[in-house]
Image: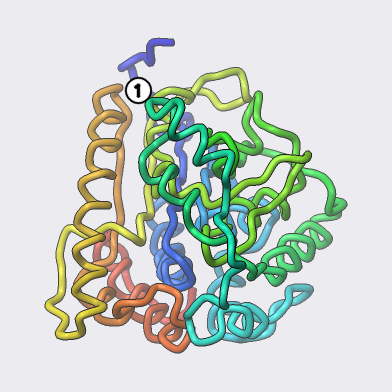
Amino acid sequence: MTVSLVRRSGPDRRVGLVLGAGGLLGSTWMVGALPALARRLGRPLDELDLIVGTSAGSVLAGALRAGMTVEELVAHQRGEPVDGVPSMRSMEHETGDGLPPLPYPWIGSPRLLARAVTAPHRVRPLVAATSLLPRGRARLDSVVSLMHSVQARLGVTEDLWVPGRPLWVVAVDYDSGRRVVFGRAGGPPSSLADAVLASCAIPGWLAPATIGGRRYVDGGLASVTSLDLLGRDCADGSGVRELDEVFVLAPLASSRYDRPGDPLARAERAVRRVVTAWLGREVRALRARGVTVHVLMPGPDDLAAIGGNVMNPRRRSRVLEASLRSSAARLGVEFTDAA
């Protein structure tokens, strides 16, 4: 379908929010960016026309669509009590010291490996490579509890999707290598909690999530933001009409860097540059369709706070506070300590 280049303005302007992969600290950084984004848009984020969540971004996407406010998300990250929501400490307990538990001693997906060998053109190289990783044994039960809790506050049973405007949660089928989008027309049926758990399942670290007899892993393997889905599917019969403007929070990309002395952080920055180039191609493709795209990425101060391990819970507080300030500056809104 051809997207019209005639754009709406004012209250009729359709806006999407894309929340990308980024691990524990990437999620924290995105939470820090949400207050400034809400002030920039001048509307509640849960009322945006489409929210797309991938990996860590799927947790925030699900929480927003289920009615958790930006103020509550910031308070939750700070370790403050939020009515009806489990404490952030439970997730910190699961991530431990930011290193994965010893995996099972066999490869993650023999079927995916076989498919990659027999039909390599049908499987993305990064996805294919994960088939060789040992099967992860950890599970983010705290994420399941969070989704169930926010759905209960909304008055929705935990086995149903959230009502209202569209929410897309992206994962990868671990046996076929195919990307799937829960919540989109034609996507597999799933509860919100199961879809988010699937989207976050890092191969080699977390156990694949099983939904409807199929195994799913981290959606970030196909794209760290899934922004390319909008270029093809903004108007696919799923209730999502063409978007005029998209805001992208991309914790794993950066356009400006710090100069870390730590070898692990230097290696992380090298990977980050590759991710940024990947994202750039997706942004250019969507802009070519006439969609206005804004990308918010961590800057030098944020990267110094993040360090070299995006799963390190000990850095969460400093990442949040750095993002609250830097995101307000980048989005051109006044910084306030309160969300």
Q: Quadrant of residue 327?
A: bottom left
Q: Is residue 299 left or right of residue 53?
A: left
Residue 338 locus on image (x, y percent): 47, 79
Residue 65 locus on image (x, y percent): 64, 50
182 in relation to 7, above or below: below
Crowding near the residue tagged with mark 1, few <14, some 14–19, many ≥20 C-alpha atoms within 10 Å: some
| Res 275 seen here | yes
Residue at x 83% of width, y 60% of height: 152
Query: For the image shown, how many numbered marks are present on the structure?
Result: 1
Q: Quadrant of residue 318?
A: bottom left
Q: Which colour scheme is used?
A: rainbow
Residue situated in front as seen by the camera: 296 or 23: 23
Residue at x 70% of width, y 54% of height: 66
Indicate the amino acid at tag 1.
Arg
Q: Name the residue under label 1.
A: 7
Residue at x 84% of width, y 48% of height: 159
Residue at x 75% of width, y 35% of height: 189
Q: Is residue 177 left or right of residue 90?
A: left
Q: Is residue 60 left or right of residue 264?
A: right
Residue situated in front as seen by the camera: 236 or 104: 104
Q: In which quarter of the image is residue 78?
A: bottom right
Q: In which quarter of the image is the N terminus?
A: top left
Q: What element carries label 1?
A: loop
